[in-house]
Amino acid sequence: MDRYSRQVLVAGIGKSGQEKLLKSRVLVIGCGALGTVIANNLVRAGIGYMRIVDRDYVELDNLQRQMLFDEEDVEKGMPKALAAADKLRRINSSVEIEAEVKDVNRKNIEELIKDVDIVVDGTDNLETRLLINDACFKHNIPWIYGAAVSSYGMTMNIIPGVTACFRCIVSSMPAPGSIDTCDTVGVLNATTSLIASLQSNEAIKVLLGDKDLNRELLVIDLANNSFDKIAVKKRDDCPLCRDGVFEYLDKKGPIESIKLCGREMVQITPQREMEISLEDLKGKLERIGDASYLGFLLKFRVDQYELIIYPDGRAFVKGVSDTEMARSLYAKYIGV
Amino acid sequence: MGIEKIEIKEDKTIKELIDELNLSSVPILLELDGEIFYPDENYGKILKAGDIVVVIRIVAGG
């Protein structure tokens, strides 16, 4: 208990609160800029068990904001979940840490969340968040949404049956390319660190049964130092809150990926009709790679990859044979 | 990006505003006179000249 002495002194925690934390079980989905700070804070705060899931590996341009990684992890090409678990065990060996290197999808999410008290969001796309939302609602597990791009970020506690859910806020998937991502508009490490710290603090409050939980969408913009609390209502026609329909959990996801036989290429196909403005997308992508609009398709080259994107959202990702990697690149650059 | 305040210059519906700003496929919340609402539940609502509408974009990065 000595290592937590300063935290135990805080009003509302005390020895009994710390004992509660020591028995708590947390799942962090996504171990990037948000996930590393969330995991770091919660492991140092003395939770009992943490499961970390991430499908990606550490790259040099992660180090600006992903606080558990270093240059050695980049050189070794370490999977993020394993690299994070290794650091976290050295930070606090009394916390049981389980690392899972996998893509979170509708087939495995219920297994991943079934034995935890809370899920904290460190993901980078809406599709996975809508899936988390369905699974947490089904199993009555609170989860904490957090997201950030550039100097702008937001977080909200989503308590099934109590607050609005994420499906209330995002009623349908936006067209690919219509929302900004960290890879198209950048992100400050202060934005991600702040949002992740707010998320971890709220997670501790949920675990302690604190009644002063934030029930609003907290929105920050470090460009003008604004902090706004937005009172989000449940949507009257929310399929999840109103009808208990787990659309993202029960059906195929909005994006399907298929490896093309014999080639280093994966085809990504959105599962609904959509129309992308390729000219707008070109404007975003040409800042980070080589983008050329050919009238009927957009070619985008970055690192060793090439994405060929069509106006209906379909894309070929060249230079990969792994479908999870292709989905990750699609989410990163096209933004769903 | 971020929270954006827009002064309405002439009367228009929420749907017209959303189309004008090219936000129809972007997840957003709107605030008018301190009330937060989902735009698609209020497409027919009339905004009057001089109204200040706040647009809150939902983001996905992390």
Image: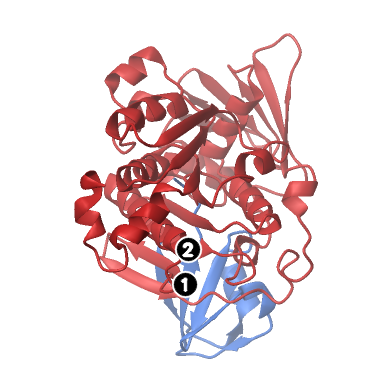
State which chain disc 1 sits on: A
Horizontal and vertical percent for residue A182? 42, 43
Horizontal and vertical percent for residue B36? 53, 80
Of mark 2 and mark 1, the one earlier in the sequence is 2
Rendered red, the chain in question is A
Residue at 27 percent of width and 60 percent of height: A223
Query: Dot 1: what SS?
Result: loop
Residue ID for mark 2:
A156
Name above or below for residue B62 compared with residue A66: below
Classed neighbour count for the residue bearing mark 1: other residues with Cα under 10 Å, few (<14), some (14–19), many (≥20): some
Name above or below for residue A169 compared with residue A136: below
Query: Dot 2: what SS?
Result: strand
Horizontal and vertical percent for residue A22? 39, 48
The residue lying toward the viewer, choosing from A235 and A79, is A79
- Using the rendered image, report if marks 2 and 1 lie on a common chain: yes
Label total for image:
2
Horizontal and vertical percent for residue A247? 77, 54
Rendered blue, the chain in question is B
Color style of the picture = by chain
What amino acid is labelled 1 in the image?
Glu
Left or right: residue A203 compared with residue A128? left
Q: Is residue A282 visible?
A: yes
Residue at 37 percent of width and 25 percent of height: A86
Residue ID for mark 1:
A216
Left or right: residue A82 compared with residue A136? left
C-alpha distance separating marks 2 and 1: 6 Å
State which chain disc 2 sits on: A
Q: Do the CB atoms of the residues marked 2 and 1 lie less than 8 Å apart?
A: yes
Left or right: residue A187 compared with residue A319? left
